[in-house]
Amino acid sequence: MTNIDDKMKHELPENAYRELKEGEVYEPIMKPNKIYPEVNAWSVIWGIVMAAIFSAAAAYLGLKIGQVFEAAIPIAIIAVGASTLAKRKNPLGENVIIQSIGASSGVIVAGAIFTLPALFIISETTPGLDLQVEFYQIFLASLFGGFLGILFLIPFRKYFVSDMHGKYPFPEATATTEILVSGAKGGNQAKLLLISGLIGGVYDFVVATFGAWAEVFSSRVLPYGEKIANEFKLVFKLNIGAAVMGMGYIIGLKYALIIACGSFFAWWVIVPLFSQFAMVDGDTITLLSSMSAEEIFNTYARYIGIGAIAMAGLIGVAKSSKIIKTAMGLAVSETFSKSTRSENQKRTERDIPMKIILFGLIVTTLLIFLFFWLGVVDNLLIALVGVAIVMFFAFLFTTVAANAIAIVGTNPVSGMTMMTLILSSFVLAAVGLSGPSGMVAALIIGGVVCTALAMAGGFITDLKIGYWIGTSPYKQETWKFLGTFVSAITVGGVILILSKTYGYTGEGSMVAPQANAMASIIKPLMSGESTPWMLYIGGAFLALILDKLKVPALAFALGMFIPIQLNTPLLVGGAIAWYVASRSKDEKVNNARRDRGTLVASGLIAGGAIMGVVSAILRFANIDMFMTAWSKTAAAEYLGLGMFVLLCAYLIWDAKQAKVEPENQE
């Protein structure tokens, strides 16, 4: 534990992170019997600004590499830094509200980009099909999904944040809480985040806007690299972006290595193996050796990854069955309890009244029905079926998502959404909806469910932070709706801009791996095309084997699906995280370096992602300064590799500047 952590923990009660003894009560920093500044113009305006900025950044990064930037920690750092510079009095409650409103960005983005870009992908890859995707469809699917996630989770707040005190680690909530209570330290951290953000932003902006050096280094430019790629189908690729490498640092070596191993297995085992076979289609025989490694990966290997992702999601649901049962029982008892809230109830225990929650659920359900009926399917029966599917899966998986975040800080929404899409497609086909209309309906249903699950997982983090610090839950719950609204508008605009600027298929497009997976699943189910069931089944069995071997199946499977060039920099970033946290014999120094590196990496991610959005907007406005011919040369790739090495050296150097304060040394 670093000295900074020690200082922060001394500001929290001693029993903040451990289970309470018989009769023991947790008293937060902000005392329940006192009133503190929480919701005011400062906190609301800053929260809106953070929601808009980080929604744009997270959407760009998620569509580019498939990893959604968790905004809670950087927003907390910025909130503390801003309040310190402005010399706000008692800003802790305000900063929690800023973080809670702003953190809507990451969860709304995850729900939207995992599913809704698949509408564009299907339209782009199907000859003669022109699906008209409107802004209001993306916006309303994200908005209503976010509202459902909030409304379904509120009855479970007491169970997760209070009844289970000390039993769940809440890793992200812990880190964010420590930052929020750090006071002046937060101001210094904000400066560090700003500097690294400028470096990451300029670095990625130069690559994306001017093509000053190649964005991807490939082994094809090495001596004999092209020959090895063509004859043996062995290719190595590395994306040299600052944001991607920074994400690897945050993920850490363990999970970055698992993701990379999934990628290596797909590209260096499955692709070369498949190149030895031929495909027979009637009288036509196609030798797979005539295909490039990239073509074999896109046509065959990634479908195995899709099957593994889906099965990993099912495994996660199965393992959480007891928690679902417990949580559903709690929800029923909370919902139908005849007791009313006492007027003397502590400020820190008050939620939005259950009657309002029920009314909100009824209104949201009605609005979703009208949205489906008038804006998606134009059929009363199918609209009713769609609403039923949304409500069932959103409620069923809400507690699974919250539990996953509480334990490991990771929400497996993609796997649960894939299962929702598959089952939704069968149900919709059974009531007579198929073809393009069925694809649109199924994907928008999936978008609403996916956003609800992402919101449930993210919001439980906010509520746990508020519980530890002592803010008013009903204020967090009320203003979370505003953050959801701002984020839904922003992500809808970014998805449309990126679709017109880069697209989601073909060379130079946004990768959008989860959305591509959703499109790959939904298209054959709804169009009567041949479905690669054997590849899906093979991936499913692989996930089962990985689970038995105690290997995180979802991380490995995502690595199999995401292109190798976006996984290798994750491994580099993870290796740097391990390196800077293991060079000293003093554990306090190692921890201080790791924490400082986390701030630098967060800055690289935020800066790179935000400037990536700026670059996309410039292209959308027909301001094209990209040196296409130069960026495709071997010299540009070597230069890119050199710049990437310098960027990694900067991260290592800056992280190792961390110092342990003498007064906290033992």
Image (spheres, grey):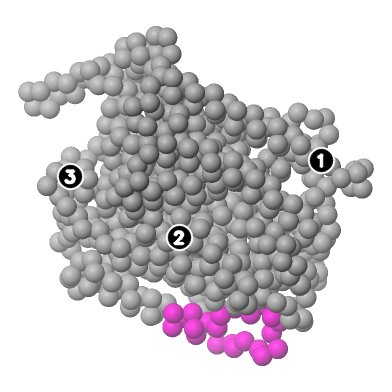
The spot of residue 523 in percent (x, y) is: 22, 47
Gap between marks 1 and 3 measured at Cα: 57 Å
User: What residue is pinned by disc 1?
Assistant: 659
Asked whether disc 3 touches disc 2, contact meaning CB atoms under 8 Å apart, the reply is no
The quarter in which the N terminus is drawn is top right
Gap between marks 3 and 2 measured at Cα: 28 Å
User: What residue is pinned by disc 3?
Assistant: 126
Which residue does the image show at 33% across and 36% down from the upper left? 508
Residue 341 inside the magenta-drawn segment: yes
The span picked out in magenta is 338-360
Q: Nearer the viewer, residue 233 or 269?
A: 233
User: In the picture shown, does residue 215 fall above or below 611?
Assistant: above
Gap between marks 1 and 2 measured at Cα: 37 Å
Which residue does the image show at 73% across and 56% down from the upper left? 187
Residue 581 visible? The answer is no
Is 370 situated left or right of 88 in this image?
Answer: left
The spot of residue 453 in percent (x, y) is: 45, 60
Residue 61 inside the magenta-drawn segment: no
Is 144 situated left or right of 323 in this image?
Answer: left
Q: Please tell me how crowded label 3 is: few (under 14), some (14-19), or many (20+) other residues with Cα within 10 Å.
A: few
Q: Nearer the viewer, residue 291 or 543?
A: 291
- Residue type, numbered disc 2: Ile
Q: Earlier in the sequence, mark 1 or mark 2?
A: 2
Which residue does the image show at 78% across and 69% down from the upper left? 29
The label on residue 202 is: none
The spot of residue 658 in percent (x, y) is: 77, 40
User: What residue is pinned by disc 2?
Assistant: 108
Asked whether disc 1 touches disc 3, contact meaning CB atoms under 8 Å apart, the reply is no
User: In the picture shown, does residue 522 fall above or below 51?
Assistant: above
Describe the element under mark 3 as helix, strand or loop.
loop
